[in-house]
Amino acid sequence: MDVLNLMSRSPLDPAAYEIEPRAEMLQIRRGGTVAFDGGLVTIGHDQAGFAFDNEGPAHRVWLEPFALAADLVTNGDWIAFIQDGGYSRSDLWLSDGWATVKAEGWAAPLYWRFEDGDWTVMGLTGRTPVDPAAPVRHISFYEADAYARWAGKRLPSEAEWEHAAASSPDAFSNLAGEVWQWTSSAYAPYPGFQPTPGTAAEYNGKFMANQMVLRGGSFATPPSHDRITYRNFFYPQQRWAFMGLRLAEDRTVARDADADDAQTTAFRKDMIEGLSRAQKAVPPKWFYDADGSRLFEDITVLPEYYPTRQEMALLRDRAAELTADFGPDAVLVEFGSGASEKTRILLDAAVDLGAYVPLDISESALTDAAIRVRADYPKLRVQPVLGDFEHLAPLPDDLPSGRRIGFFPGSTIGNLQPDEAEAFLAEARRMLGEGALFILGVDLVKDPAILVAAYDDSQGVTAAFNRNVLIRANTELDADFDVDAFVHRAVWNPDASRMEMHLQAMAPTTARIGDRTFRFMTGETIHTESSRKFTPESIQTMAAAAGWTVVRIDTSPAPSVALAVLRA
């Protein structure tokens, strides 16, 4: 850490190593969160083996139910925070933190630099492009706290972190050996703390003021410090060490099945019906709980995953033409809105838009997106609708009277079976009414090698996204899937012109959902997603079957995606 800090002062961006020195490789993401019931737990060193005096004595702490993210926050996550104005929004920051941002001119983590449209970072191997899949480093407590607030989460207390690490160490990736992880706990003595006699007493006790605790350990941490009880501490504005974060959230104890809300009931029904088929399957809409939505945002910035990048570029290039026929007081209805990032391109171009109606199945993603859009477009009416785009309800009666515009980007239409896609487009036409426009994003047929790589990335993010549906079932349906018994598979099906994602059982296993038991043989799969790829001809055929007329099709450079404009 000290060496890197010194190197960063040089305008030459020197490198100390060709390859970053580390004992172990970065672990792949697991996805989701790990839940804990809380209660009375014991933390702190118990006198067995060496520890520093600030690690003890062992004592009891009461914890409310909580959940801790299985993975560290990534550079890609942090870039989204920056792009959403994270360093310019005072509402996200503690008062002292905001004062530090303004005084120091912070706009990104330490050692980051924005050059020629891309972020670079100074490390032990010199200045290199920021890897969006790698855990973020060199952030202060103030930044970690602001990010957590932006994400709708919080930092864990050190007691929560230690209890989680002691109870379920295998449930997490990079629990230690990557970055020190900020907690919400002030550095203070444990009950009954006594400093080590002699000169060592000068080390820990006298620093127990105005500092915050970090847990875990970085890739540069000596093995002798690799203990779950180890308490590192820094001032909240410091960020030169290898510091990152892992998010936490409060957890409500699961309710009985009789108390299920409508969405949970539908999830349970789809899981049981899908797993009862000869080819077990789960509808892909159930990917998108809060963790699944966040993982998908991670996927969109991966180098292999071209669809989001290409579609965003195409939207920017054609935004004026796409919005030219909206007319005054138009209502933009986005189906499966997610984080609403692509929508902003249309919102910027359609200056006289009357209202924006995001529709999504994930309540957390919908709420977060609506809050951010309202903050950035204060004059625009934002009317979020929680729901399933496969079962559309009528639009609110009091919306502006302008033309209705449907927006369905991301080639999500490809996740539906051909008959389902036609049914959705027909239902959307009825919802939006005569004269409506519909902007449809589709992925086009291309080299299967490019497609497979996009759905089976080298960092394992898509695999974590796929397995998260089982984690969600365990959490929301009280199922008992052995998530580690399943691996991610991505295959090209040329006959159906689609990519397929499966979860394949690596050994015989069983899973319960309520009173139903499902058995899996070795090699058996759960088909979790199909992503159909289109040609201009197949777009025309699908649209016509649903009662739409194709007005135009715009295609991006290779690897190509397309935006089709339909008229009712």
Image (cartoon, rainbow, N blue to C red):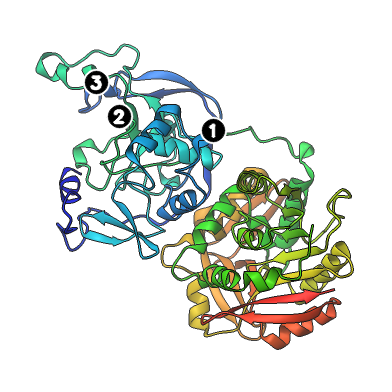
Q: The N terminus is located in which quarter?
A: top left
Left or right, 92 with respect to 179, comes to right
Q: CA distance from mark 3 to mark 2?
A: 10 Å
Q: Residue furthest left?
A: 199
Q: Is residue 354 left or right of residue 456?
A: right
Label 2 element class:
loop
Q: Which residue is mark 2?
A: 235
Give the residue displayed 22% in from the left and 57% down from the top: 20
Q: Name which residue type carries label 3.
A: Phe
Callout 1: helix, strand or loop? Answer: strand
Report the front residue among 274 and 334.
Answer: 334
First in sequence: mark 1 or mark 2? 1
> Residue 65, percent across and down?
56, 30
Residue depth check, mark 3 versus mark 1: number of the one nearer the observer? 3
| Residue 247 seen from this side | no
Task: Kindly identify the residue that appears in the image at 20 percent across and 62 percent down.
Answer: 19
Residue pointed to by mark 1: 66
